[in-house]
């Protein structure tokens, strides 16, 4: 079954809500159980996890104007082992923070672009407690990823 890997660094209830919304989107009933969501805490994500998946949802807090160190560790670990095998795979980013997410988003997009992954949803920027609209968009982001891989 096609799999979307959710690589997340969940440090608070706000991020946990966003992760749950993305999972709900990937496993939306309209997709009839055709795509699996695989949750992968960033500090334990391996190159094998990334190679085994078909698409990626990246969910991170922004810390000091950058992605979390945990997600950076994933990229440092997987870059060369996954570089040729994951070209063009779809990905989408959820960035959470308290004020300014620009540096965090730029940092992820730079590495995803070097990996030649395909961004299939605009970066979802959430500041503070997620509102209804944020959660709806997180769910839509998950469904978009699932739809991209469901026929594989
Ligand atoms: C050391 C540190 C640096 C942070 N830097 C940023 C930042 O550059 N931009 C931002 O929007 N939020 C920043 N934050 C806020 C975190 O992104 C936020 O705490 C995290 O997303 C969890 O949010 P919550 O506790 O409100 O749920 C920072 C937090 C810490 C602890």
Image (spheres, rainbow, N blue to C red):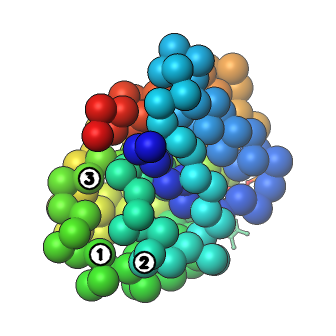
Point out residue 44 in the picture as x, y percentages from the top left corner: 63, 77
- Answer whether labels 1 and 2 touch (C-beta < 8 Å): yes
- Answer whether labels 3 and 1 touch (C-beta < 8 Å): no
Q: How many angstroms separate mark 1 from mark 2 (CA)? A: 7 Å
Write the residue at 57% across / 23% down.
Answer: 28
Label 3 packing within 10 angstroms: few (<14), some (14-19), many (20+):
some
Q: Which residue is labeled 2 in the image?
A: 47
- The disc, 3 or 1, on the residue closer to the chain's N-terminal end is 1
Asked whether 145 or 54 is in front, the reply is 54
Q: Quadrant of residue 121?
A: top left
Q: Is residue 74 above or below residue 17?
A: below
Please say whether residue 150 is visible from this viewpoint.
yes
- What number is the disc on residue 115? none
Q: Is residue 84 left or right of residue 69?
A: left
Q: How many angstroms separate mark 3 from mark 1 (CA)? A: 11 Å
- The disc, 3 or 2, on the residue closer to the chain's N-terminal end is 2
Q: Which residue is labeled 3 in the image?
A: 89
Q: Is residue 108 left or right of residue 142?
A: left
Point out residue 77 in the picture as x, y percentages from the top left corner: 43, 85
Q: Which residue is labeled 1 in the image?
A: 82
């Amino acid at each position: 079954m096609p799999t979307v890997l959710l690589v997340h660094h969940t440090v608070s209830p706000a991020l946990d809500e966003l992760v749950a919304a993305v999972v709900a989107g990937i496993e939306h009933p309209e997709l009839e159980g055709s795509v699996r969501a695989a949750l992968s805490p960033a500090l334990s994500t391996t190159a094998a996890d990334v190679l085994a998946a078909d698409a990626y949802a990246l969910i991170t807090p922004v810390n000091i104007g950058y992605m979390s160190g945990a997600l950076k560790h994933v990229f440092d670990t997987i870059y060369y082992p996954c570089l040729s095998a994951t070209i063009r795979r779809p990905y989408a980013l959820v960035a959470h923070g308290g004020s300014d997410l620009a540096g965090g988003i730029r940092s992820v997009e730079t590495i995803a672009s070097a990996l030649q992954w395909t961004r299939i949803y605009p970066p979802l920027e959430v500041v503070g407690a997620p509102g209804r609209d944020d959660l709806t968009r997180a769910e839509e982001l998950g469904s978009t990823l699932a739809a991209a891989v469901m026929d594989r």
